Amino acid sequence: MSKKVIRIGGASGFWGDAAMATPQLLAAGGLDYIVYDYLAEITMSIMARARAEKPDAGFATDFVSQALKPNLAEIARQKVKIISNAGGVNPEACAAAVRALIADRGLDLKVAAITGDDLIASKDELAAQGFAEMFSADVFPDPKKILSVNAYLGAFPIAKALGEGADIVITGRSVDSAVTLGACIHEFGWTPSDLDKLAGGSLAGHILECGPQATGGNFTDWESVIDRLEDIGYPIAEVSPDGTFVCTKPEGSGGVVNVGTVSEQMLYEIGDPQAYMLPDVVCDFSQVKVEQQGADRVLVWNAKGHPAPDTYKVCATYVDGFRGGLTMSFYGMDASRKAERFAEVVYKRARRTLRGLNLPDYTEVSTEVIGAESQYGSARRIEVSREVVVKIAAKHPEAAGIGILLKEATGLGLATPPGLSGFAGGRPKPMPVARLFSFAIPKSRVAIAVEVDGRKIAMADAAGRPFDPASLARPETPQAAETANLVRVPLVSLAWARSGDKGDKANVGVIARRAEYFPYICRSLTTEIVVERFAHFLKGEVERFVLPGPHALNFLLHNVLGGGGIASLRNDPQGKGYSQLLLEVPIEVPAELARRDGLPAA
């Protein structure tokens, strides 16, 4: 067991992330671990289909071919340990591929695979037991339509594998931050009762899990980093035994690490910041402090933890019909009106063909005119635009129904309003709609095993206890000083913001650039304002959470993504641009403050 600060590099935020991360982090030197996050709910359904076609598939092949293959000798030389959830739905096959690579290179590295998360074999039993969807209370889907069923495992199995001497640890579905927390548990000997430390290590993992989103990617102040995005640095967390950490990046790399980039990533894809539920700990980020320590060095501390829950979150994906669509561009006079009219004609012709074949109607259609500000809603849409892209999409119970839509859209190429253009290959194809079904299962129902080079070790997480968010003491909202002389400035001049998705929910985190701005943001940026801003998307409620520590608000928007992921027909099915819509909202501040800081008028 070590008592030092450990340095962990985050090299992947999704399946398909850039191959530059691993050699960049290795070149920086001095790392103890490199961690990789590849998985999302959509990814699991894709991997499940791959495994169904080929038994030794179903994992992130990029991890083997791009992350490890060119860099394995240097990894071994530096004695950097590797932790990844690249196993997807087939961690054993991924581990076998890595072992074959190690043998081919003549290296001496031990590989561990963690299993137990995959519950697909129990789908009929789970359906019979009537597990309800944890957010909508929907009934369990038809087992015949299920693609994947995976429990989100935690970090203690990873720590166990490291304790057994593994140099490379491969998991199936674990929570994204577990690959970092597992290293911390192993190095510092943290136990399930070290709640604040576990919360701090989890937050470090949350900052690393999306790679360069912590170092200037997707940053509100994008112009401050745009000149060197081509060689942006991947994040490094220097974690201390007490769970505090410094976020940094390789020296000389592009991007930036500052209070804004780290705070934005902290709020990315979270719901209730006082009840961020993980298998190992329930985290409270509401009092976290984020402080600049130097160039590209940010200290993060004061995360708090509650005892782990007694359940695992399980996500099942299942097929629910088909979807498809395409984009075409129009330019010239009245391009936006031409595009909308063209879309109407496509649907009319496709529906006529459906009726002729005795097929049902489309269950949903979607038209978005990009360039006419359709993302802002009809009230703010530009009626006349001279250059647009029109997206036409639909869902149908059968692939044939989508095929008809696509054929009719392309078949109208010589019968459109003038100005049609485009750059594309062949006609798109229908795709199955993979929906998400989330539920909670007792931890005792999941049998975890750690397999290290042929030796399998059974283990179980701490039992945990039920968690009730209603028991939490909520922080007070800071009150703005009363003054008669107020002016309106855009939110972006006062705050950073970032948005993300979880299923059909989206969150927008808003962080004050200065503590003194925070009370004015709280006063003006109400849930009613957010509801109005997203009314054209929103089907559920909006919750607002206050985080006094980082001077931030988090808005959780329910049923706002049209199903989310590949169940959605939206141009932005994951809400990644929602923060941009909110940053234009006017905020009232004292005129004296606006003059002092040179804040622009809204």
Image: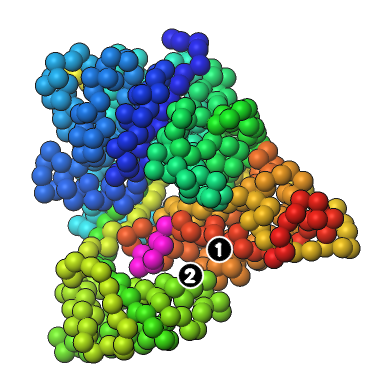
Rendered image quadrant of residue 448: top left
| Mark 2 residue type | Gln
The answer to whether residue 495 shows anywhere in this view is: yes
In the rendered view, tell whether residue 370 sits above or below residue 342. Answer: above
Residue 150 place in picture, x, y as percent: 30, 43
Q: Is residue 327 left or right of residue 549?
A: left
In the rendered view, tell whether residue 215 sits above or below residue 512. Answer: above
Front residue of this view, candidates 389 and 89: 389
Q: Residue tagged by mark 2?
A: 375
Residue 488 place in picture, x, y as percent: 75, 64
In the rendered view, tell whether residue 597 sits above or below residue 186. Answer: below
What secondary structure is found at the residue carrying circle 1? Answer: helix
| Mark 1 residue type | Leu
Q: Which residues are magenta?
A: 568-574
Q: Is residue 26 left or right of residue 90?
A: right
Label 1 Cα neighbours within 10 Å, binned few <14 / some 14-19 / many ≥20: few
The answer to whether residue 270 shows anywhere in this view is: no
In the rendered view, tell whether residue 438 sits above or below residue 249. Answer: below
Q: Main secondary structure of the magenta part?
A: loop
Residue 19 place in picture, x, y as percent: 29, 37
Q: Quadrant of the C terminus?
A: bottom right
Q: CA distance from mark 1 to mark 2?
A: 8 Å
Q: Tell me the residue at 52%/74% (across/down).
A: 377
Q: Earlier in the sequence, mark 1 or mark 2?
A: 2
Q: Is residue 235 left or right of residue 26?
A: right
Residue 349 place in picture, x, y as percent: 24, 88
* Mark 1 in CB contact with mark 2 (< 8 angstroms): yes
Q: Residue tagged by mark 1?
A: 581
Front residue of this view, candidates 259 and 366: 259
Residue 61 among those drawn in magenta? no
Q: Quadrant of the N terminus?
A: top left
Q: What is the tally of numbered marks visible in this picture?
A: 2
